[in-house]
Image (cartoon, rainbow, N blue to C red):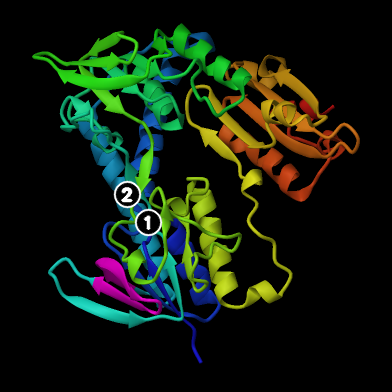
Amino acid sequence: MTTRIVIIGGGPAGHSAATYGARLGAEIVLIERDVLGGAAHLWDCIPSKAMIATGGALSFLARSEGMGLEQVSPHIDLDGVRERLSGIEAKLTNSTNRVLESQKVRIVDGIGTLLGPNLVRATTPDGEHEDFEADYIVLCTGSRPRLPDWAAVDGDRILSTRDAYPPKQLPEHLVVVGSGVTGVEFVHMFRSFGSEVTLLVSRQQVLPAKDPEVAAALEDDFIRRGVNLMKGARSTGIERTESGVIVHAEDGRHAEGSHALLAIGSIPNSESLGLENVGIETDGGYVTVDHHCRSAVPHIYAAGDLSGRLPLSSVASMQGRKIAEHAMGMHDLPHRHLDYDKAASAIFTEPEIADVGLAEADAFAEGRKIRVTKVPFSVSAKALINNDSRGFVKIVSDPATGVVLGGSIVGRHAAELISVLALAVTAGLTVTDLVESLFVHPALAEVLGEAAE
């Protein structure tokens, strides 16, 4: 008998669950109300990285004089940027659609709602509905930007993150509220575009969840580039003026600018799923799951942002794959659970920041004995060739066994280089394994070997 899997949400988790489920012989129905590929993925992640790439090109040209080239001064073409983003989204969506259709996944345009433990209703944009019986159900409806009551987002002067890809006009002076990953990426992006930027930091360092040394490196670069950092400034309100905005902080300080951008997290899209119809409770809107991504109802899974785990596309994709394998009985075979502590992540600022595994500060907080080695990119011939020697590689290892436990990279192409350390952490490799690897010369990756010595 064919296994029937109904998936609500076509983002990285839903697409992956559908793809692997179909390969394993399941009959798949995928219900998506916005865009195949995922709204958070295609309307947040991809556009921001594409705009950052444009800003990176500007930054590279600004450094061109140091590489024997005459200085040039290009200008931002917002219409061109907008067209480029639309083209990238269309290509990715079409690619996703082709893959799913080739695997005979039925794609339904509509909103999915649970009517019962094994029954899902899809309501189309024209109000029609169709019901689907399911042996397994996968919920992966993603998230949306969190908008506080004290900020009247208008998409004009007061922006959510989704209003800024790109904004209607380039801000003369942007005030960014939120100093987490999304916030610092916007600071970098718009400063690269030439906007004056003020960042309100509610605590005493940007990226409060990251290694303090890593955060300090980014702060130093922001200050060097003229970013105004207001630390310890928790925002409480935004006032529209004739010419711009004023963002008020809890301690009485304020920041004035032409535009304000809110980057203060996200909230899960769980309110219209009908969870109450099947007895699934949420914690802050997130569905609680076990290590198989199962909810309180064992045959109903949750993945991606909705699961409340790491909000990364890579994690969502792997969750989707693991769900498909589990639903199709592969958990009876040798099966590795998804280890969130070994997920690599990156922040696409300049310099880039990436990390994986155990952080130095967390190890000390836990009282664990570790060995920490750090090497700056200034020792790298390739960094000098690139005219960009900012940053460093830091590796955390077990002093007794040499096993690589984690690491951080600040510098050019950190998001690519962290893959080496991610593999080492996942596979239990040692620093000796890295030292004895024959890296390309000249290459930035050589610094990984030097940091492992």
Q: Secondary structure at mark 2?
A: helix
The residue most toward the left is 242
Residue at (48% x, 63% y) in the render: 16
Labels 2 & 1 near each other (Cβ < 8 A)? yes
Q: Secondary structure at mark 1?
A: loop
For the magenta stretch, what is the residue range?
107-122
Residue at (59% x, 37% y) in the render: 416
Q: Residue 404 appears at what percent x and percent y?
A: 78, 38
Quadrant location of residue 78? top left
Within 10 Å of the Cα at label 1, are there few (<14), some (14-19), or many (20+) other Cα atoms? many
Q: Main secondary structure of the magenta part?
A: strand
Residue placed under numbered mark 2 in the picture: 89
Q: Does 392 sit above or below residue 52?
A: above
Q: Does 293 sit above or below residue 387?
A: below
Q: CA distance from mark 2 to mark 1?
A: 9 Å
Locate the C terminus and report the quarter of the image it occupies.
Answer: top right
Looking at the rendered structure, the kind of residue marked 2 is: Glu
Residue at (91% x, 35% y) in the render: 400
Residue placed under numbered mark 1 in the picture: 37
Front residue of this view, candidates 5 and 350: 5
Q: Residue 157 appears at what percent x and percent y?
A: 17, 24
Q: Residue 223 appears at what percent x and percent y?
A: 46, 8
